[in-house]
Image (spheres, rainbow, N blue to C red):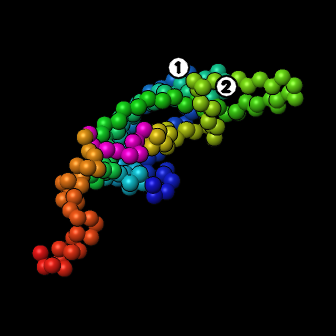
Amino acid sequence: MNGPVTQAEFSRVIDTTALAEQGETFRYEANAAERAAIASWLSLISLRRLEATVDAKPVPEGGVRLKVAFTADVVQTCVTTLAPLSTCLQEAFELLYLREIPRQTPLAAEGITVDVDLDEDEPEVLIDDKIDAGAAITEHLVLTLDPYPRKPGATLDSVHAAAGAARAGPFSVLRELKAGR
């Protein structure tokens, strides 16, 4: 990746002070410039589509819960053949934003117990009553991408055979050039 995503690449800020009590639904679509910037940042060949639906609802704890579903059409490079590989990603996630994160009580010296709830991530800090849903969507897009995309059926053997690399070794091309072929 080329560096951190900036607000200019894909920013969709929700002002939580203006949310209706029952919550609101937002629909976002990245424009061509935003898609190009994200594709460059993620070293993608292209990002053809990025659309999301965000449900934002206030919670009694003094924050907001986001329920997000996004679809992205990405073109990556196959790690085996180096050919373009198109994929449609569909993902859903939830985030909880709180104004104040509850502090953990110190563990007692005796009888330490740890309650781990793996079903929910730690809440995010709600800063200035604003949430950048675009940044959250981009972060989850990164997590959804296959780090080693491979075309179905692509193997190194098929690549070597197609390239004629089954010759007499890595220096066979140099020998052929020297022989004038």
Residue 14 in view (yes/no):
yes
Q: Nearer the viewer, residue 50 or 15?
A: 50
Q: Is residue 74 magenta?
A: no
Q: Is residue 147 magenta?
A: yes
Residue 61 rendering spot, x and y as whole percentages? 67, 24
Marks 2/1 in contact by CB < 8 Å: the verdict is no
Q: Is residue 15 above or below residue 8?
A: above
Neighbourhood count class around disc 1 (C-alpha, 10 Å): few under 14, some 14–19, many 20 upward: few
Residue sitting at x 51%, y 23% = 23
Quarter occupied by residue 102: top right
Neighbourhood count class around disc 2 (C-alpha, 10 Å): few under 14, some 14–19, many 20 upward: few
Instruction: Please give the label number shown on residue 61.
Output: none
Q: Amino acid at mark 1?
A: Gln
Instruction: Please give the label number shown on residue 116.
Output: 2
Of circles 2 and 1, the one toward us is 2
Q: Nearer the viewer, residue 154 or 73?
A: 154
In the rendered structure, the answer to whether residue 154 lies left or right of residue 129 reads left
Q: Nearer the viewer, residue 106 or 133?
A: 106
Residue 174 rendering spot, x and y as whole percentages? 23, 74
The quarter of the picture where the N terminus appears is bottom left
Point out the tag, 2 or 1, that comes first from the N-terminus: 1
Give the Cα separation between the discs numbered 2 and 1.
Answer: 30 Å
The quarter of the picture where the C terminus appears is bottom left
The residue where tag 1 is placed is 22
SS at badge 1: loop
Examine the residues drawn in magenta and state their main secondary structure: loop
Q: Nearer the viewer, residue 26 or 6?
A: 6
Residue 8 rendering spot, x and y as whole percentages? 46, 52
Residue 40 rendering spot, x and y as whole percentages? 38, 55
Q: Which residues are magenta?
A: 144-152
Q: Is residue 102 above or below residue 165?
A: above
Q: Amino acid at mark 2?
A: Val
